[in-house]
Amino acid sequence: MIPDRRVQPAMTPTQRIRIWGLGALAFLVLIYLLRGVLLPFVAGMAIAYFLDPLAQRLERLGLSRTMATTLITLVFFVLFGLLLFVLMPILEQQVVTFVQRLPAYVSALNDRAQPLVRELHARLSPKDIEKLQSSVGAYAGTAAGWILDFVKGVLTGGIAMLSILSLLFITPVVTFYLLRDWHKVVDTVDAWLPRHHAETIRFELKEIDRTLAGFVRGQATVCITLAAFYGIGLTLTGLDLGLMIGLGTGLGAFVPYVGMLIGLIASLGLAVAQGADWPLLGGVGAVFLLGNMLEGNFLTPKLVGDRVGLHPVWIIFSLLAGGALFGFVGILLAVPAASVIGVLTRFAMENYMKSSLYHGGGEP
């Protein structure tokens, strides 16, 4: 039987929009339903994307793609494992020391707070004090509940024991195959593009790649450098949990301003609990001052630059929204999704500014 090769009638713009909208909705629903098993695949994809430029350099030096991928994957995960092997005993010792000293910290903070409490009692009436206590308790309870719910959602969405095991065993395999076949994946996706819009889509995808490369690769390098700087610096000052707080501050720099601010508050609070002698407070302040100067004057301008086009507020919102909707997988996907939405929004606004909808029916 001869197959029917008749040309299908062209779709109307409304039909095309409907099909693409249904496809996007189905994609989001699929991610939501599979969010519990996607973590190692998303992590492997992120690592492969991060390491792809290095694989291209090794290819230009004469190595095959498979050989370059094998070498890069092996070195990356061996170094990561060695780093964990070295850091985990130190972090464990700091946590144990912190737990042992916690009663003394609480007592020291209570002693320092007593003069302030007496001053409040002297200046405020009993009714005002009761209102203040109830308000502080209510706000503290609400904030603690929100933080616990958010952490619980992130953990149950991606960091269960099964997900940790899958990260250890599946992520390296996913990274290897995606890194080896990266260009094949790109060519396959390119072949799926609608032909009459292929050039426009390719241009916008290059903008998305430029944004991601500028932020993810650049900011990840900034975070790793700052984590090492803050971890070593706060440890040398003698701050308890200095290594843990320093690593968290550096890695938290992925969220602009928030990571550094939280690290500074935690460090100063712990310094006050330790005794708040001036050398310790001065050391902590000097570490954060130098770290902020290093990030603002050298690391971010050199490694990230101002071409990214992702506003810090938009990044913070995307990370919170991704974590609330999809757990830890959503956090990993938040910045790529924010990049895609940002590029498409700019594209839509450019076309809107050129359209008769903007110019009131006349020619632009």
Image (spheres, rainbow, N blue to C red):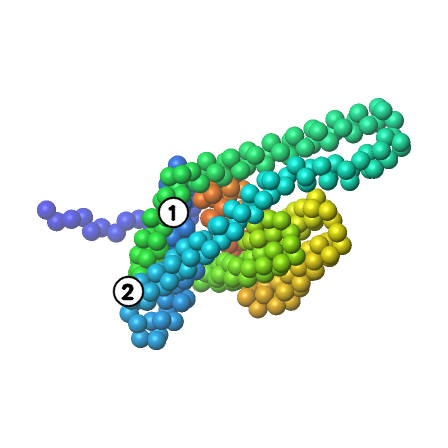
Local packing at callout 1 (Cα closer than 10 Å; few below 14, some 14-19, many 20+) is some
Q: In x, y percent, where is residue 141?
A: 65, 30
Q: Nearer the viewer, residue 36 or 250?
A: 250
**Kind of residue sitting beneath label 2:** Thr
Quadrant of res 194: bottom left
Q: Which mark is residue 66?
A: 2
Q: In the rendered view, would you say 164 is above or below 287?
A: above
Judged from this view, the residue extending furthest toward the bottom is 61
Local packing at callout 2 (Cα closer than 10 Å; few below 14, some 14-19, many 20+) is some
Q: In x, y percent, where is residue 75?
A: 37, 62
Is 293 placed left or right of 38 in the picture?
Answer: right
Residue 244 visible in the picture: yes
Residue occupying the point 60% across, 43% down: 98
**Kind of residue sitting beneath label 1:** Leu
Quadrant of res 164: top left
Q: Nearer the viewer, residue 248 or 297?
A: 248
Q: Quadrant of the C terminus?
A: bottom right
* Residue at image mark 1: 167
Q: In the rendered view, would you say 358 is above or below 72?
A: above
Is 86 placed left or right of 172 in the picture?
Answer: right
Q: Nearer the viewer, residue 302 or 198?
A: 302
Q: In the rendered view, would you say 163 is above or below 350?
A: above
Q: Secondary structure at mark 2?
A: helix
